[in-house]
Amino acid sequence: MLEYVKIILMKVSFDRRLFEKELRKALNLLMPTEIQEFKDWCYRKFSGKYEPVLDKYFISLAG
């Protein structure tokens, strides 16, 4: 499932609204053991463009 959600995010990364929607869906689909790897990957790939979106979802997971 992890590889699948990565592919989806790459395909929708051109649009902020779609990216946020698919990120939210991905976090609901992934197993808890996959979340940290997914988080690291997201920040490596998208922090330049979508860091506020990533922070919104990953920081809320930590709390």
Image: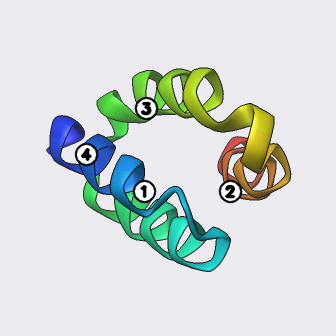
Q: Secondary structure at mark 4?
A: helix
Q: State if disc 3 and disc 1 touch (CB < 8 Å).
A: yes
Q: Amino acid at mark 4?
A: Ile
SS at circle 1 = helix
For label 3, the crowd category at 10 Å Cα-Cα, with few meaning under 14, some 14 to 19 and many 20 or more, is some
Q: Secondary structure at mark 3?
A: helix
* Amino acid found under the numbered disc labelled 3: Phe
Residue wearing tag 3: 38
Q: Which residue: 29% across, 56% down?
A: 8
- Up the image or down, 25 lies above or below 44; here it is below
Q: Under tag 2, what secondary structure? A: helix
| Disc on the earlier residue, 2 or 4 | 4
Q: Are marks 2 and 4 in contact (CB under 8 Å)?
A: no
Question: Between residues 24 and 16, which one lies in front from this camera angle?
Answer: 16
Tell us which disc is closer to us: 4 or 1.
4
Mark 1 or mark 3: which comes first in sequence? Answer: 1
Mark pair 1, 2: CA separation = 9 Å
User: Which of the marked residues, 4 or 3, is nearer the chain's N terminus?
Assistant: 4
Question: In the image, which disc is placed on residue 57?
Answer: 2
- Place of residue 34 in the rendered image (x, y in percent of width and height, measured from the top left): 32, 31
Residue depicted at 43% across the width and 32% down the height: 38
Q: Position of residue 42 (x, y in %)?
A: 54, 34
Q: Amino acid at mark 2?
A: Tyr
Q: Residue at x 65, y 49 (%)?
A: 61
**Residue highlighted by disc 4:** 7
Residue for badge 1: 27
